[in-house]
Amino acid sequence: MREFIVEADGGSRGNPGPAGYGAVVIDAVTGETAAEASESIGVATNNVAEYRGLLAGLRAAHALDPAATVHVRMDSKLVVEQMSGRWKIKHPDMKPLALAASRVFPPDRVTFEWIPRERNKHADRLANRAMDAAAAADAPSAEGTESGAAEAGTTVGVAEAGTTAGVARAGTTAGVAEAGTTATASSSASSVASAGGREAAGAGAGAGAADDGGTGAAADRRAARVVAAPGWAPADMGAPATLVLLRHGETPLTPQKRFSGSGGSDPSLSDTGREQARLAGEALARRGTVQAIVASPLARTRETAGIVAARLGLDVRIEDGLRETDFGAWEGLTFGEVRDRHRADLDAWLADPSVAPTGGGESFETTAVRVAAARDRLVAAYAGRTVLVVTHVTPVKTLVRLALGAPPEALFRMELSAAAFSAVAYYADGNASVRLFNDTSHLR
């Protein structure tokens, strides 16, 4: 069995700023360099760049010998401690990158060691070369700028009702820009996301948002350098874990626009809601791409999922983290009624995602934590597959918001109809493509 040493580094000019990584694979027996990898990744943080360097080094080693053992040496205490399991990974940008890195080799064949920066000069030199290229590419220029695209570092893609929001990623939907750019994409009507993340339910125009480590430099201006043994090429990211998000069908409370969370009466579907669920099942059956179904534990989502599952011939798995927010004393009330009875509490709730509704409800901040944890479980369990996730307004908006990197207040800028589809495809490198479809006319 071959033994490799992977030395990796990454950084940015500004944190965040023009960023890049470097990695070198060394034969542990001969001490010879077996592979090098470096790449500029647009604008990113130091930690994102470091994780990208680790991932590139592990993949280069895997391409040389998938059966090898690997000893990783880095001067990033954060990455070493987190990958060793001694420190918890809290930042949402780090989690998918760490997950991807942990999957390259079986965990028992990879060890990690922190080393001082002066002992990591080879990887550091490669990373600095990539950062220099990123800084050059980030210089003001008309080249590579998309019409109507936001400037580097801004937040893009909080979609209005009925639109499609796409996070740019290399190799996704035709017409979507390469990784790190901003562009416009379109989709055909009444389609549902496939395992490859190329299609999604509904129709609309799309606005792209930059990925973890990228902003507006076009792919042909991104400096990328990979040197390795003959025949080696960058690893294929593979098919994503695609979550097709379906809001449950209407309940008697839906047309009245009443707060209906996890702490209220837990209503069942109305006749209209059951028909919406039936038509959603028909739309999914035509596509034939859904391989599993997961639902919130509440009655309206279990009923919606059950109707769809009967059409697709699949079982339904319950995921508690997908339940709706508990709206406390506001359950069953309209927005106007809450404003009349609890004006101060409502104003505070609208201004701060950490504030819970009156009477011991659940804040959007708390909801986001459990929804993100449920997302991580689903992405790990359904890597390379397409799963239908039947849930509620807040969890759907939260999943979309997190994938776009949008702020919490974006929840108030999205509208989601009953039985509306959305889709998020999660790739092994941490990128995601997002689509919102609010028009349910194709279900009627």
Image (spheres, helix red, strand yellow):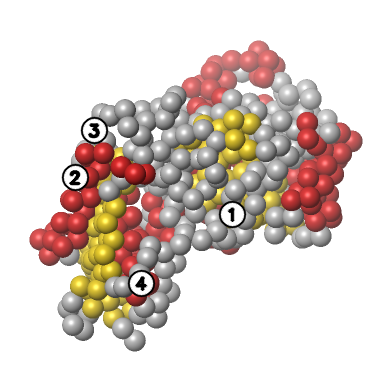
Q: Which mark is residue 404?
A: none
**Disc 4 or disc 1, which is closer to the eye?**
4
| Chain-order first, disc 3 or disc 4 | 3
Q: Which residue is mark 4?
A: 231
Tell me residue 198's x, y (percent).
60, 48
Evaluate if marks 3 and 1 touch, with contact meaning CB atoms under 8 Å apart: no
Q: Assess whether mark 4 and mark 2 are in contact (beta carbons under 8 angstroms).
A: no
**Residue 247 at x, y percent in the picture:** 70, 39
Q: Quadrant of residue 51?
A: bottom left
Disc number for residue 132: 2
Q: Can you say which quadrant of the picture contains the N terminus?
A: bottom left
* Amino acid bearing label 2: Asp
Residue holding disc 1: 196
Q: As rendered, which of 160 and 333 lies closer to the eye?
A: 160
Circle 3 is placed at which residue position? 139
Mark 3 → mark 4, Cα distance in angstroms: 34 Å
Q: Secondary structure at mark 1?
A: loop
Q: Is residue 160 above or below residue 130?
A: above
**Looking at the image, which residue is at 78% across and 22% down?**
256
